[in-house]
Amino acid sequence: MDTEQTDAYLRRIGAARPVAPTSDALRELHLAHLRSVPFENLSIHLGEEIELTARALVAKVVEARRGGFCYELNGAFAALLAALGFDVTLLQARVYDDERLGIPYDHLALRVRTRDGGDWLADVGFGAHSHLPLALGERGEQADPGGTFRLVERAEGDLEVVKDGKRQYLLESRPRALDDFTSGAWYHRTSPASHFTRSLVCTIITGDGRVTLSGRTLTSTVDGERRITELATEAEVLAAYERHFGIRLVEEPRVREVR
């Protein structure tokens, strides 16, 4: 990313260019990203291609003003952080479904090292997760606006990421390249067993809660209180995507049949 592209990305998330790649700067960028770029799987159901290159991912987030799922969001965020001077490593994780682990390369997360000695787990692509980066070296509880987190050591250097007592994913420490996640992205785009092919989701955190649109069900959470609205028409759905997520669509996404 050149200076112009980096500045455009920063404008997209409403963040100032940090003076230096520090831990405080990372926290500000992480939260700004989560409040500006939604977690969504609409491309799968709109028949759009998902290209795992930094250029394509940044273009989707910045130029098309869309969101994405983990490979897209954390892939784009990694490009931004690297352009700003952060030391970024891509890590693969397997997501827990109750007690079962998902496929290899199920999830993409980021290890970010900052100039002031911080070593952080950054993840803007897991939906409802931590609002701020988690300290990779901390083994006690880490309080966050999104919940209480712990990183638990497992075999071979793996880390179990736990939120509010529930295991979220098993994170490897070995560095990966963006191309390594192609098979995981293909699986989640095409497999009937993937929850991404079975439902629609678009969600973003707000200053006082969260807004989620799943199909025609709009859920707004404000200060812990949930309000559910069933949208009746395509026009209402399209208006909701634009109002709450800044996404302009020409047609209502619908779950596509996968065989």
Image: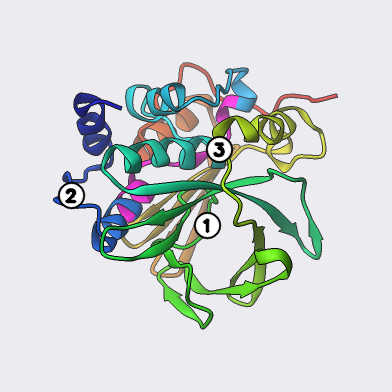
Circle 1 residue: 128
Circle 2 residue: 18
| Residues drawn in magenta | 31-43
The image position of residue 193, as x and y in percent, is 82, 39
Element on which disc 2 rests? loop
| 37 relative to 183, above or below | below
The image position of residue 28, as x and y in percent, is 27, 56
Element on which disc 1 rests? loop
Q: On the image, which quarter does residue 4 sit in?
A: top left
- Residue type at numbered disc 3: Tyr
The image position of residue 115, as x and y in percent, is 27, 58
Give the mark nearer the N terminus: 3 vs 2: 2
Give the mark nearer the N terminus: 3 vs 1: 3
Circle 3 residue: 71
Give the mark nearer the N terminus: 1 vs 2: 2
At 33% from the left and 28% from the top, the residue drawn is 62
Mark 1 vs mark 2, CA separation in Å: 26 Å
